[in-house]
Structures are given as C-alpha cells and as structure tokens.
Amino acid sequence: MSIIQEELEEIKLHVGDIIIQHSSGLIGILIEKFRNFPIGGESTEGIWADIWFWRVQWLKNVDRRVDISQAPFLNETLEEEGLKMSIFIGNIYHHSQSQGKFTEQDHE
C-alpha cells in the first residue's frame, strides 16, 4: 500500500461533517453517503462495489473578500475518493464531528 493510500484511508467522512472549498470559501455539509449504480447495474460486485458518493449541501461563502462570481461550479454530488484527495492536497478543508464536537482534520 502506498503512503498516499494510507493517508487517504485515515480521512474519515461522516454525515454532518463540514467541508470548506479553499478557493471560494464556500461551506458544505455532508448530507448522505450513497452508491450510484448505472441503470440496470445494481451490483455489489466488480468496479461498482467500491464507488461511493456524498451528497453535499453548499451553504455560503465565509470569506467575503473572495469573489465567487468566477468560482468553479461546486456539484452537490461528490465522489468519495475524489473528495478525500481534495482534502489531502488542501483544496478542501475538512471539519469532522467527532464525539459531539468539531475538530479540524489536518493531514499535512
């Protein structure tokens, strides 16, 4: 297992966690984890077995100094491994609700 894979496995995402997109300052809340199978492909085997998605409710820009008129569109559905990679590289900040309180997950 590579070092990056180990680091990505350490990132634990839960319903209610807060994410902040670094460049736009937009806040998102993780609402639901789900699988998105292709039509007629509801299978727990093969490539589809490990692909998970998160539904995100994007709220607002917390950094009023950042102009979000030219910000990239933030989808309400994010693939889990892509989200973890964005957290790992620092494009998205992750605040996890752990044991009733929020703590920042720092992976540097």
Image (cartoon, helix red, strand yellow):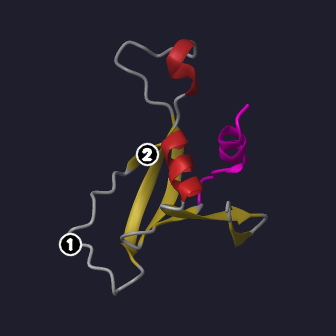
Residue 48 horizontal side relative to residue 38, left or right: right
Task: Identify which amino acid the numbered label 2 is placed on.
Answer: Leu
* Residue 7 on the magenta segment: yes
Residue 71, quarter of picture:
bottom left
Q: Is residue 47 above or below residue 26?
A: above
Label 2 secondary element = strand
> Whole-Å distance between the Cαs marked 1 and 2?
21 Å
* Residue 62 on the magenta segment: no
Q: Residue furthest bottom?
A: 65
Crowdedness near tag 1: few (<14), some (14–19) or many (≥20) residues, C-alpha within 10 Å: few
Residue designated by label 2: 78
Residue designated by label 1: 69
Which of 65/61 is in front?
Answer: 65
The quarter of the rendered structure image containing the C terminus is bottom right
Which of 78/88 is in front?
Answer: 88
> Which residue is painted at 59% across and 61% down in the image?
17
Residue 6 horizontal side relative to residue 82, left or right: right
Image coordinates of residue 50 in percent, x first then y, are 57, 26
- Are discs 1 and 2 less than 8 Å apart at CB? no
Q: Mark number for residue 23?
A: none
Image coordinates of residue 105 in percent, x first then y, are 68, 64
Image coordinates of residue 33 in percent, x first then y, are 54, 42
Q: Residue furthest right?
A: 99
Residue 99 horizontal side relative to residue 28, left or right: right
> Which residue is painted at 79% across and 64% down in the image?
99
Image coordinates of residue 70 in percent, x first then y, are 21, 68
Magenta region, residue range: 1-16
First in residue order: circle 1 vs circle 2? 1
Task: Identify which amino acid the numbered label 1 is placed on.
Answer: Ser
> Which residue is painted at 37% across and 12% down in the image?
40
